[in-house]
Image: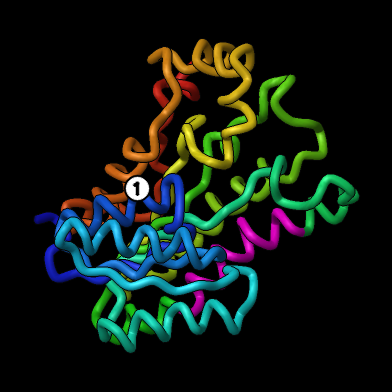
Amino acid sequence: MRLKGKVALITGGGSGIGRACALLFAKEGASVVVSDIRPAPAKDTEERIRDDGGDATSTTGDVSITSEVMEMVETTIKTYGKVDVLVNSAGVASRNAAGPNATPEELWDRLIEINLKGTFLVSYHTLPEMEKHGGGSIINLASIIGLVGHSKGFGSAFDPYPASKGGIIQFTRNMAIFCADKNIRVNCICPGYTRTELTKALTDDHEKVSILEQKHPMGRLGEPEDIAYAALYLGSDESSFVTGIPLVVDGGYTAQ
């Protein structure tokens, strides 16, 4: 087992990539704390892990609220005594970050608050616990849209999503430098378009999904498990000399 004896805190663990990471990490021996802003999906992931013979607990919280982030970390420490791996998977897309009547400014603020500030807050409050126990691995979820712009028809000039994910990439690099001597590795994953709840509005549109598939040289979109296996590598000791990287998992999208 590649994560035997490790404790993993996974935000956004109630669905999509976060859930895939939680299920895979548990199969690989980790004790998993599943965090999500929605109680029912978090509990469902916990129960799936337990039904499969794994060890998990769940907690509810908004990653953009300091007190709730602190509670996530406290739950992890109270339950398992440490945290070895953090996966910052909680995030939103411009399609679902705010209500239909939100102004462009309100949309920008909410999306940056969840994607970028949330990644900062959970990392900030987890880091001291990793230091206490001699190290760890922080894995942030960025995106290929943090590396390249949206294609026309899939965003706008003022879409906050690319800025939020680009910010995560640079936050990752900077944090990695300052945490390296603490034996804490900080990396991020840049998925291509992946079939999750966040992309459902796109994947339910047959014309758009066909265009997106053609943009990926491998001819398909990603699945949450494709990203989870990349996170598994970064969370395991196999990547002990890897820090500060954006690991691209995109079926060749950004190689063009």
At 41% from the left and 77% from the top, the residue drawn is 127
Left or right: residue 213 compared with residue 79 = right
Mark 1 residue crowding within 10 angstroms, few (<14) / some (14–19) / many (20+): many
Q: Position of residue 53 (x, y in %)?
A: 15, 61
Badge 1 element:
helix
Identify the residue under disc 1: 20
What segment is highlighted magenta in the picture? 110-125
Q: Quadrant of the N terminus?
A: bottom left
In the rendered image, is residue 171 in sight?
Answer: yes
Nearest the camera: 121 or 207? Answer: 207
At 33% from the left and 85% from the top, the residue drawn is 77
Q: Position of residue 27 (x, y in %)?
A: 17, 54
Image vertical order of residue 202 relative to residue 77, above or below: above
Image vertical order of residue 160 relative to residue 126, above or below: above
Image vertical order of residue 38 relative to residue 181, above or below: above
Left or right: residue 216 compared with residue 227 = right
Nearest the camera: 106 or 51? Answer: 51
Image quarter of residue 255 = top left
Which amino acid type corresponds to the residue marked 1 in the rendered image?
Ala
At 14% from the left and 70% from the top, the residue drawn is 5
Q: Position of residue 199 (x, y in %)?
A: 57, 35
